[in-house]
Amino acid sequence: MEQFKKRQFAFLLLLSCVTAITFGIHAYLLHYLANDKTFFFPVWQIYVFHFVVTLVFYTIINYVFSSGKKQIFNLFMGMTFVKMILAILFLLPLLLSDFENKQPDVFNFFIPYFLYLFFEVFTITKFLQKQ
């Protein structure tokens, strides 16, 4: 259980740093390149969603791995599928609304989505290789 806590704390610290940096860059770019554009979702809501989902999924994978089950590929793939469903549910109010131009909001969501997905794969692969 000590390894679980150590990995979890390191991941939380790294995730917080990655979130702060990507959020800062994203907010900066939107402020200077799309200042006159109105978005359906504020950028902070998108990053809170990604932060929470990534943290919860990593915690589940880390816990299962720490409890002795070393084959977590199926769990990771299943949770990636759940993450896709949650992304659609998050975007559903936008998709069902009569908001005029939805494409910038979708890009605002999916660019960080893929960055966080890459980050998840990288960190999980990294701690699995150490074993």
Image (spheres, rainbow, N blue to C red):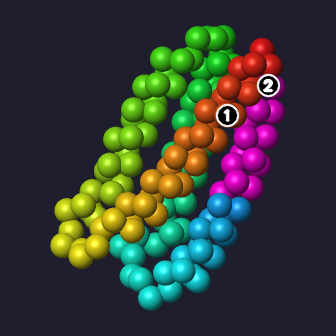
- The mark found on residue 3 in the picture is 2
Q: Nearer the viewer, residue 123 or 6?
A: 123
Q: Is residue 54 visible?
A: no
- In percent of width and height, residue 95 lies at 24, 61
- Residue at position x 24%, y 74% in the image: 99
- The mark found on residue 50 in the picture is none
Mark 1 or mark 2, earlier in chain: 2
Q: Point out the residue furthest to the front here.
A: 33
Query: Range of the magenta residues?
Result: 1-19
Question: Horizontal placement of 65 versus 52: left or right?
Answer: right
123 above or below 74?
Answer: below
- What type is the residue that disc 1 sits on? Phe
**Residue where numbered disc 1 is placed:** 122
- Label 2 crowd (10 A; few <14 / some 14-19 / many >=20): few
Q: Point out the residue furthest to the bottom here.
A: 36
Judged from the image, the secondary structure of the residue bearing numbered disc 2 is helix
- Please tell me whether the stretch drawn in magenta is mainly helix, strand or loop: helix
- In percent of width and height, residue 51 lies at 58, 52
Residue 15 falls inside the magenta stretch: yes
- Residue at position x 53%, y 55% in the image: 112
Residue 4 falls inside the magenta stretch: yes
- Residue at position x 18%, y 73% in the image: 98
Q: Are marks 1 and 2 in contact (CB under 8 Å)?
A: no
Label count reads 2
Instruction: Give the spatial CA distance, label 1 vs label 2.
Output: 18 Å
**Quadrant location of the N terminus in the rendered image:** top right
105 above or below 114?
Answer: below
Q: Is residue 9 visible?
A: yes
Q: Nearer the viewer, residue 61 or 67?
A: 61
- What type is the residue that disc 2 sits on? Gln
